[in-house]
């Protein structure tokens, strides 16, 4: 057995039961119910991804809760290899596989040596009741890859998944581990223009969002609570990237001010080269297209993104804003802007 086979066997067996950490006589093609293949399992086509596919729960099982999730990693991963670990959270009313294609970093797992866990909330809205499940997934990856081999751990969250990331980085478990947070339209640690009314009208018009668990605030109350928490920066220090659609901002620019950049001692924000995409993303919200809303999001399509960075932050951290021009809340990210965000994440030294 090669060293690559050994580690892949370890990863797969851990998904099903807390058994020995050493696997024998396995191949990367089929490992304990988890298939490592190219293209990745349950991957959408370039366009018109079937609804039955985007609601898939995953090919991995978190053994302590029995809940499914996606675990993507390079099929040629070597034992002892340094990787970047990403926990990617879907938004309210969504699914792990929709998130996996909304921000399709799975396409770059091999090139940039990424281990990506994409979980699912059974209520389709994250709450503290899901924390044990999320912590178990993180612990599983740390145990199997090896803490010393995870050079960075990023939380990524879209919409309510971003707001959940904001809550998680304030908990002891995640505060000790997270080195970066990428918020995909999930709140900025700093001021933003008001969200336009058309965003909320479209959100209310859809029928895909599930009811939240008892005690979880909804609507205006949930948004107010989330925005209030963003005004109070977390205690810890980590890299932070905010990505959003131009129309979500009411077509207004993001203010230059960033309290988080100030906290990390970064210099004044600078404009970087735009990212240009000739190809659209994989997914969109098909339930809110009649009549639709620019702020909520329309069909996937090409476009360009403006990139702003606060340079020279302490300890090599990164703080940045990325605005996808002409886009709203739910058009899946295009390939080049996805790759640019991955590069920015990997550029952080700590």
Image (spheres, rainbow, N blue to C red):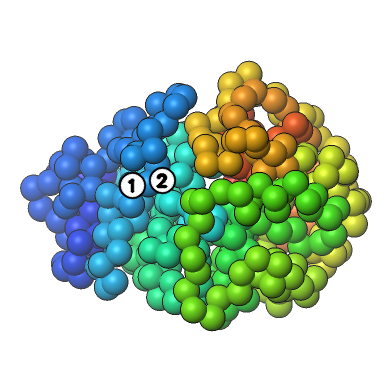
- Contact, CB < 8 Å: mark 2 with mark 1? yes
Q: Residue at x 38, y 70 (%)?
A: 133
Left or right: where 63 falls relative to 100: left
Rendered location of residue 163, percent (x, y): 63, 64
Q: Residue at (75%, 46%) from the top-left corner?
A: 198
Query: What residue is shown at x 47% (from left), y 74% (from top)?
Result: 213
* Residue 163 vertical placement versus 32 (above, below): below
Please state, as top left, top right, bottom left or bottom right, where the C terminus lies in the image. Answer: bottom right
Q: Is residue 252 above or below residue 339?
A: below
Q: Secondary structure at mark 1?
A: loop
Say whether residue 104 is left or right of residue 81. right
Residue 203 rendering spot, x and y as whole percentages: 63, 51
Q: Is residue 267 left or right of residue 139?
A: right
Q: Earlier in the sequence, mark 2 or mark 1?
A: 1
Q: Residue at x 75, y 53 (%)?
A: 319
Q: Which mark is residue 97?
A: 2
In the rendered image, residue 84, in percent from the top left (x then y), is placed at: 49, 51
Please, what secondary structure does the residue beneath circle 2 have? helix
Specify whether residue 13 is in view.
yes
- Estimate how packed mark 2 is, as few (under 14), some (14 to 19) or many (20 or more) residues with alpha carbons within 10 Å: many
Q: Which residue is at the front of the view, 100 or 327? A: 327
Residue 242 screen position, x and y as percent: 71, 51
Q: Which residue is mark 1?
A: 56
- Which image quadrant for residue 334? top right
Q: Residue 103: which numbered mark, if any?
A: none
| Quadrant housing residue 222 | bottom right
In the image: residue 330, left or right of residue 55: right
């Amino acid at each position: 057995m090669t060293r690559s086979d050994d580690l892949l066997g370890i990863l797969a067996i851990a998904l099903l039961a807390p058994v020995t950490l050493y696997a024998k006589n396995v191949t990367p093609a089929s490992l304990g119910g988890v298939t490592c293949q190219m293209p990745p399992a349950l991957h959408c086509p370039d366009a018109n991804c079937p609804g039955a596919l985007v609601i898939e729960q995953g090919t991995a099982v978190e053994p302590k809760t029995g809940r499914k999730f996606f675990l993507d990693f390079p099929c040629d991963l070597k034992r002892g290899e340094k990787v970047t670990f990403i926990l990617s959270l879907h938004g309210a009313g969504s699914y792990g596989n929709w998130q996996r294609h909304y921000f399709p970093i799975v396409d770059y797992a091999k090139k940039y040596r990424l281990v990506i866990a994409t979980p699912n909330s059974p209520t389709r809205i994250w709450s503290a009741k899901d924390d044990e499940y999320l912590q178990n997934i993180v612990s599983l990856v740390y145990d199997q890859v090896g803490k010393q081999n995870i050079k960075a751990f990023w939380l990524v969250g879209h919409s309510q998944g971003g707001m959940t990331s904001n809550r998680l980085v304030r908990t002891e478990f995640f505060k000790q581990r997270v080195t970066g947070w990428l918020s995909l339209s999930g709140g900025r640690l700093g001021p933003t223009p008001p969200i336009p009314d058309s965003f909320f009208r479209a959100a209310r018009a859809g029928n895909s969002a599930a009811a939240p668990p008892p005690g979880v605030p909804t609507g205006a109350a949930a948004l107010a609570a989330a925005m209030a928490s963003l005004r109070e920066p977390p205690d810890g220090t980590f890299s932070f990237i905010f990505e959003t659609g131009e129309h979500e901002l009411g077509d207004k620019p993001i203010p230059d001010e960033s309290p988080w950049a100030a906290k990390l001692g970064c210099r004044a924000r600078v404009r970087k080269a735009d990212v240009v995409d000739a190809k659209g993303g994989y997914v969109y919200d098909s339930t809110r297209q009649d009549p639709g809303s620019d702020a909520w999001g329309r069909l996937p399509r090409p476009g360009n993104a403006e990139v702003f960075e606060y340079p020279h932050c302490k300890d090599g951290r990164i703080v940045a804003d990325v605005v996808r021009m002409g886009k709203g809340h739910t058009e899946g990210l295009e390939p080049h802007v996805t790759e640019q965000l991955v590069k920015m994440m990997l550029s952080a030294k700590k």
